[in-house]
Image (cartoon, helix red, strand yellow):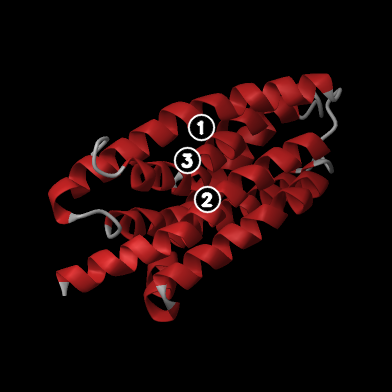
């Protein structure tokens, strides 16, 4: 895999960033941010995340169904593009400090990245040749988690500290996460279509 298609592997790693790093941002970093800088009670934040988790549970099968109807590539591009914009609305709502504001804000971000996450694995797997497919998708997912998932809360904490709790650098971080996946999905279209033609 490393010798034969390192570029394809790099694209697959980056395509997974939104689904993995995005969840670390909303489910891990946001707990620290809201309790430390907005002084929102931890119990309130956890209640919000519980509601959002139930919402995500419902979004996953619905997203897969919609993607099959409109086209997987188009669906992923749309959800990644929307996710570039959602953090600004998310932080504006979260700043209200209420359960409703928290749930709507975080839920909006999770709706986009959750829909993306529901479909990206199948999309990425189709880009790899059959001989190296399992290794390729496994390495892509695990390396994306280790690199981007692990670094996202750390980077968010550094940005929040240096900005004195201001949310705009954090929104830009989330936008960058979504943009990385958006560009990678666009770049994966050609190799994916080649593999699907060979399989046919």
Q: Which residue is mark 2?
A: 181
Q: Quadrant of the N terminus?
A: top left
Q: Position of residue 179 (x, y in %)?
A: 61, 51
Closer to the N terminus: mark 2 or mark 1? 1
Mark 2 → mark 1, Cα distance in angstroms: 12 Å
Q: Which residue position is annotated with label 1? A: 148
Pointer 2 local density, CA inside 10 Å: few below 14, some 14–19, many at least 20: many
The answer to whether 89 appears left or right of 166 in the picture is left
Residue sitting nearer the eye, 47 or 76: 76
- Left or right? Give the position of 64 relative to 113: left
Q: Position of residue 37 (x, y in %)?
A: 81, 25
Location of mark 3 (residue): 20
Q: Secondary structure at mark 2?
A: helix
Relative to 72, 52 lies left or right: right
Whether residue 41 is visible to the viewer of this picture, yes or no, is no
Tell me, yes or no, whether the two marked residues, 1 and 3, touch with CB atoms within 8 Å: yes
Q: What whole-number distance in Å separates the C-alpha atoms at marks 1 and 3?
A: 8 Å
Circle nearer the viewer, 2 or 3: 2
Instruction: Please give the name of the residue rendered at 35% of the width and 40% of the height, measured from the top-left corner.
Output: 140
Q: Image quadrant of residue 85?
A: bottom right
Name the N-terminal-most of marks 1 and 3.
3
Vertical placement of 139 versus 108: above or below?
above
Residue 57 seen in the figure: yes
Residue 121, labelled with which disc? none
Q: Quadrant of residue 177?
A: top right
Query: Foreground: 74 or 47?
Result: 74
């Amino acid at each position: 895999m490393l010798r034969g298609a390192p570029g394809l592997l790099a694209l697959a790693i980056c395509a997974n960033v939104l689904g993995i790093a995005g969840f670390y941002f909303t489910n891990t970093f946001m707990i620290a941010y809201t309790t430390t800088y907005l002084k929102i009670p931890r119990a309130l934040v956890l209640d919000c995340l519980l509601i959002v988790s139930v919402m995500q549970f419902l979004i996953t099968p619905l997203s897969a169904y919609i993607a099959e109807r409109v086209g997987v590539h188009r669906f992923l591009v749309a959800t990644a593009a929307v996710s570039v914009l959602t953090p600004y609305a998310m932080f504006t709502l979260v700043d209200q400090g209420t359960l409703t504001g928290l749930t709507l804000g975080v839920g909006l971000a999770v709706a986009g990245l959750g829909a993306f996450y529901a479909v990206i694995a199948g999309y990425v797997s189709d880009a790899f040749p059959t001989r190296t497919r399992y290794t390729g998708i496994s390495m892509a997912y695990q390396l994306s988690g280790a690199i981007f998932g692990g670094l996202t809360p750390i980077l968010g904490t550094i940005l929040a500290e240096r900005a004195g709790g201001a949310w705009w650098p954090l929104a830009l971080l989330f936008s960058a996460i979504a943009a990385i996946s958006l560009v990678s999905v666009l770049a994966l279209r050609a190799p994916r279509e080649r593999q699907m033609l060979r399989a046919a």
